[in-house]
Amino acid sequence: MTGRRRLGLVAAAATLLSAAPLSAIFDTWTWLLQCILAVSLVAGSAVLTRSLRLPTWAQIVGMALTLLLTLSWMFPSGDELLSVIPTPPTFQHFGELFAQAGTDTRSYGVPVPDRDGLLFIATLGIGAVAIAVDLLTVVARRPALAGLPMLAIYSVPVAVYVDSVPVFPFVVGAIGFLWLLVADNVDRVRRFGRRFTGDGRDVDVWEPSPLAAAGRRLAVIGVAAAVLLPLTVPGLDTGLLNRLTQVGTGVGGGTGGGGSGRVNLFASLTGDLNQSETVDYIKVRTNEPDPYYLRFGTADLLTAEGIANRTPTGSPLSRGLPDPRENPVVTGDLKQYRAEVEITNKYAQTLAPVYSSTIKVDGLDGAWSYDSTAQAIFSRRNTTKSQKYSFDYVRAKYTPDQLRQAEPLAADDPIRQEFTTVPDDPSVKALVARLTKDKESEYDKVFALYRHFSRDNGFSYALKAPEPEGGASAIAAFLEQKTGFCQQYATALAWMSRVAGIPARVAFGFTRGGGREGDRYVITNRNAHAWTEVYLDGFGWIPFDATPQASVVGSSRSEWAPDIDRVDTPSASPTASSAPGASSSVGPGGANRPDRDPSENNLGATGAENPSGGSSTGLLITGLAALVVALLLVPALRRILVRKRRHAATAPVTTATATASPPGTRDVTVTTETVRAREDAHAAWDELVDTMVDYRVPVDPTETPRHTAQRLIREAELAGAPADGAVLLGHAEERARYARRPLQGEGLTAALTQVRKGLAATATRPTRLRAVLLPPSVILRWRMGLAEQSTRWLSSFSRARDVLVRFSPRRLLAGRAR
């Protein structure tokens, strides 16, 4: 097989290895089987076109056409010719798969199930990367550039696992890339002739050389640095890629799943909320009898698709936090409480969950800041993973009559200008105008909009939001079909409030959950929630949770925003107090931002700890650690077994009957004892040579055993029993090779032991450790065996190619040429 075709096969294999990071995205291995088939067919097409010596453009067309036929066969629309030839409906079906993949990315947390759209994207992407890698490696002869499309595959889990990118898939992909570079280098050397070691002698292609060893060391160091550097240098998750991947899908209230530990601050008006495993995120203790929701940020950038967040800005926590009780404009009964938060290692994001109107934080270092507008605590360097902190906060209680006293903000007020911008939708404007007709106060208008999302008006909770139909907008579709989960309800109420001229935004956080551990609330990934906050002059941001309360575990309601499915109107009594724990987030303002990861649409409800989960994880980690240790000990175990076999005591032997020699000749007696003595001497010598290799003493096969033993004594500085043992072993091997009668008798095993002890005594500590744990003699033997096997494989491929060439269609046409 020629070098170009061989490189093409290596490029295909390297592409499949580089696809290893996708194993962290999919729940099963269906994607891998489909990618293997697609890449294999593309590589086969490349080999065929190159065997026919077609031009480069024909090779590209052949690979692209093969990938298209493969996709048509794997993801059929039902209208293909002969089940593989695409037709116009096939391409229409591909477009539907693209759209489905876009929906699925907003609907599922990792690992995702086998969805046709996602599998189609994965197969198409890996197939396209295989074509690009083949062209860069074989046609352009720039295998180093082939690392760019291979690296693009790894960017997928990087975008999903922003804080904890899986390491092992990266190592597998790096091995594929290094293999590609080595294969290209070997092919260049084969075409050049022979290579040199750097010490004045030439070697065969597969023979190890010092220069190659230096290259391997650099490659290992480079891969290790690429893996370990992000783990040791802080702040590497705050760069451009992280910012580009902050917007994902939505937060779900009451149900959902995922375990990435990061919560997305993008409330979409369409999409699905799918469940997966339950993961404990937060344990919180507070002296407030009935606390409201923990919050970590807000979103106020309203678009036709939903509402998203801004990047937070603020001052370090060390400068203190504002106290709303010091603001003379703020009214209401403000009481101070204290909370303690313990976050697990499963919840890692750059926004710290706190209650509204936090006035003091203890336990978070100077890397954390406070955004007074969004009332969010954020960091650009650290995450909440395994954090423990406490904070003081104040809770405000209002009555509906008090809130009715809020006056409308002036048209030129900065808060009104910033938080009332809304996309134009005539149907929403008409609905808001109808609902707020004859409502005088700002509060009455908001409450009328809030009350519209009642069960009596047909609204219900569902895990799938409506898809727009007939050109309708997403907000109009939701208000028409009246089904969705928390992100749809929160965004819709904020949208309608803005249409009414009242500043509004969406807050993100967690409900109290459905389980407790002693005096602590246990909050899981299923308790993430979104609700609406509206700004009323003199009161600040007031929360309204329009999501049906019965569908949200740990839901809380207030007197000014009661459960509308149970209460007709709020109490107008001026002496009434709000339900315990419900409150506003005092203080004007409004934007926020979180550092978000797109794996999260899945959040919702439940809470108790799962001890069996921790036990399973511990057993898994222990098993993996034991497996790693066992693999590391394989070379040492192999060396021990070989040494034991060579040191095995010789079994008793019997003397064979001597055969009489012809008169006038010397007697040469061959017995089983002499045969065994030669074998023992050779085995002892082989063990001595391996010991020299282990302790980095050069071995020269051209030397006689006696000279090798003398050089060993001289270079290793052996003396006494070790030196005598080396002399004995050299003498035994010399007699076994050249003498009529080999050296017989005991002592070879003891001599080997003495020599090994002498070498260990004079060697450095790293050399001794390597000789025991990673014996170079074993590694060298495995490496040479692998080289020989590779040579045999290449020879077999070459012979098979020669056989195929005999049946080439070009030969059949050659004789007909005139």
Image (cartoon, rainbow, N blue to C red):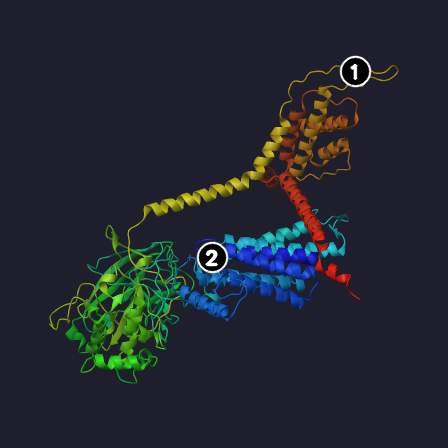
Q: What residue occupies the far bottom of the structure in this picture?
A: 411
- Tell me the distance, in whole angstroms, between the alpha carbons under discs 1 and 2: 76 Å
Q: Quadrant of residue 305?
A: bottom left
Classify the position of the N terminus by image quarter. Answer: bottom right
Residue sitting nearer the eye, 241 or 277: 277
Q: Is residue 395 above or below residue 29?
A: below
Q: Residues within 10 Å of mark 2 (few under 14, many from 20)?
A: many
- Given the image, on which type of amino acid does mark 1 rest? Thr
Q: Residue at x 65, y 26 (%)?
A: 749
Marked residue nearer the N-terminal end (1 or 2) = 2
Residue 165 horizontal/vertical position (percent): 47, 57
Q: Is residue 63 left or right of residue 491?
A: right
Q: Which residue is mark 2?
A: 165
Query: Percent position (x, y) of residue 563?
Result: 19, 66
Q: For the image shown, how many numbered marks are present on the structure?
A: 2
- Pinpoint residue 814: horizontal percent, then vertical percent: 76, 62
Q: Which residue is mark 1?
A: 659
**Tag 2: residue type?**
Val
Question: Is residue 225 among the parts visible in the rendering?
Answer: no
Which element carries disc 1, helix, strand or loop? loop
| Label 2 element class | loop
Spot occupied by residue 12 in the image (x, y as percentages of width and height): 60, 57
